[in-house]
Image (spheres, rainbow, N blue to C red):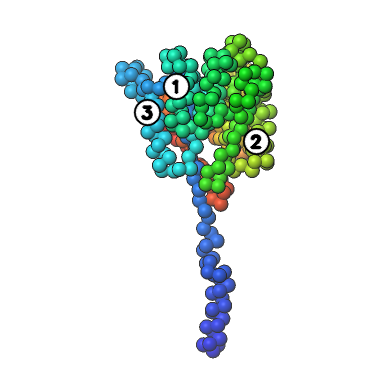
């Protein structure tokens, strides 16, 4: 082959391989994104740390320590969302005196994105809860309490879609059955909707209509129950197994301290992460979801003592 012909053919081959300046290796470079989820549950008006002489939790917890950790994580990754799974109210004199206002104001300072309702949010009745909801600068999310015949009508959302770095995160909330747990006069004409049916309806909306890349349930159903004692109680483990489309269940109500999350196969055999961070603000859950080209590829979970 003549030298000039060789150079010409080599140049053509190089042009084909680089596709206008992009090498073949460029097609294996995937854009990676990290979405961090922080969560609490059952903080129960614990604003201050436990006292130094407490038998179980000396000097642990407190809103200031929580704030410090939240700020650290947000500095590392601005694509962070912060949620609570209910029972923010009741448990210390702060609630007795302020009725939930202080708790919500501190959550505003910490810049929570959303919370769901626990049974103790009803401790001052529907009127007491409705009076505090406008204080919250974050979304109150619940899909299975029908408040249409109560003063709470219009004050909550069944779901909310958040977008971080182009990733759409759909969040919906579920509450525990109030009958037998909360005095009827405190929840009035609130109608409890089946959590399994509600969850499947929500995930269909979030996946198919809203085109969410990640679906999270804020649940105050409780982690697990002894079916011999509570055969009709729906837990987070039941919810995960009997639904589809949920990626993460952030739980509350049972004050369960999980050293690591539980993985449950859903109704179509896909993994669902179930996590809960104890109670009283003593722990915070952190889940990092990794996306490549907007497809979820991996996650890591840890529960941090505060």
Horizontal and vertical percent position of residue 169: 57, 40
**Disc nearest the viewer among 1 and 3:** 1
Instruction: Please identify the quadrant where the N terminus is shown.
Output: bottom right
Give residue 188's position: percent from left, percent from top.
Answer: 63, 13
Residue at label 3?
64
Comparing 72 with 104, the one in front is: 104
Label 2: which residue? 203
Whole-Å distance between the Cαs marked 2 and 1?
33 Å
Determine which quarter of the picture holds residue 24. Answer: bottom right
Sequence-first disc among 2 and 1: 1
Q: Residue at x 61, y 29 (%)?
A: 157
The residue closer to the viewer here, 249 or 142, is 142
Which of pointers 2 and 3 lies earlier in the amino acid sequence? 3
- Tell us which disc is closer to us: 2 or 3: 3
Asked if residue 277 shows in the view, the reply is: no
- Residue furthest to the bottom in view is 2
Binning the other alpha carbons within 10 Å of mark 2 as few (below 14), some (14 to 19) or many (20 upward) gives: many
Question: Badge 1 is on which residue?
Answer: 102
Give the secondary structure at mark 1.
helix
Q: Where is residue 164 in the image (x, y as percent from the top left)?
A: 52, 43
Above or below, 10 relative to 68: below
Q: Which mark is residue 247?
A: none
Label 1, label 3: how far apart the Cα atoms are: 14 Å
Q: Marks 2 and 3, Cα distance to the nearest angstrom?
A: 35 Å
**Pointer 3 local density, CA inside 10 Å: few below 14, some 14–19, many at least 20:** some
* Left or right: residue 89 compared with residue 174: left
| Among the two numbered marks 1 and 3 on one chain, the one whose residue lies closer to the N terminus | 3
**Local secondary structure at mark 3:** helix
Callout 2 secondary element: helix
Which image quarter holds the C terminus? Answer: top left
């Amino acid at each position: 082959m003549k030298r000039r012909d060789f150079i010409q053919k080599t140049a053509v081959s190089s042009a084909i391989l680089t596709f206008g300046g992009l090498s073949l290796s460029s097609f294996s470079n995937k854009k990676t994104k990290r979405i961090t989820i922080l969560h609490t549950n059952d903080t129960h008006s614990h604003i201050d740390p436990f006292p130094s002489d407490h038998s179980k939790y000396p000097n642990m917890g407190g809103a200031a320590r929580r704030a410090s950790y939240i700020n650290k994580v947000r500095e590392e990754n601005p694509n962070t969302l912060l949620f609570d799974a209910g029972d923010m109210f009741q448990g210390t004199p702060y609630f007795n005196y302020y009725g939930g206002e202080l708790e919500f104001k501190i959550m505003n300072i910490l810049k929570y994105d959303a919370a769901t309702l626990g049974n103790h949010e009803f401790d001052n009745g529907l009127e007491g809860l409705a009076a505090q909801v406008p204080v919250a600068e974050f979304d109150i999310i619940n899909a299975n309490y029908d408040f249409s015949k109560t003063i709470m009508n219009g004050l909550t959302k069944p779901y909310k879609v958040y977008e971080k770095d182009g990733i759409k995160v759909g969040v919906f909330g579920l509450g525990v059955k109030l009958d037998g747990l909360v005095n009827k006069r405190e929840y009035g004409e609130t109608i409890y909707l089946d959590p399994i049916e509600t969850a499947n309806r929500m995930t269909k909306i979030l996946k198919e209509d809203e085109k969410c890349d990640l679906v999270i349930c804020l649940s105050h159903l409780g982690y697990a129950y002894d079916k011999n004692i509570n055969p009709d109680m729906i837990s987070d483990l039941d919810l995960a197994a009997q639904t589809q489309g949920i990626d993460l269940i952030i739980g509350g109500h049972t004050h369960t301290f999980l050293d690591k999350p539980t993985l449950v196969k859903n109704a179509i055999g896909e993994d669902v992460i179930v996590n809960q961070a104890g109670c009283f603000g003593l722990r915070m859950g952190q889940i990092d979801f990794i996306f490549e080209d907007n497809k979820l590829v991996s996650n890591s979970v840890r529960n941090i003592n505060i």
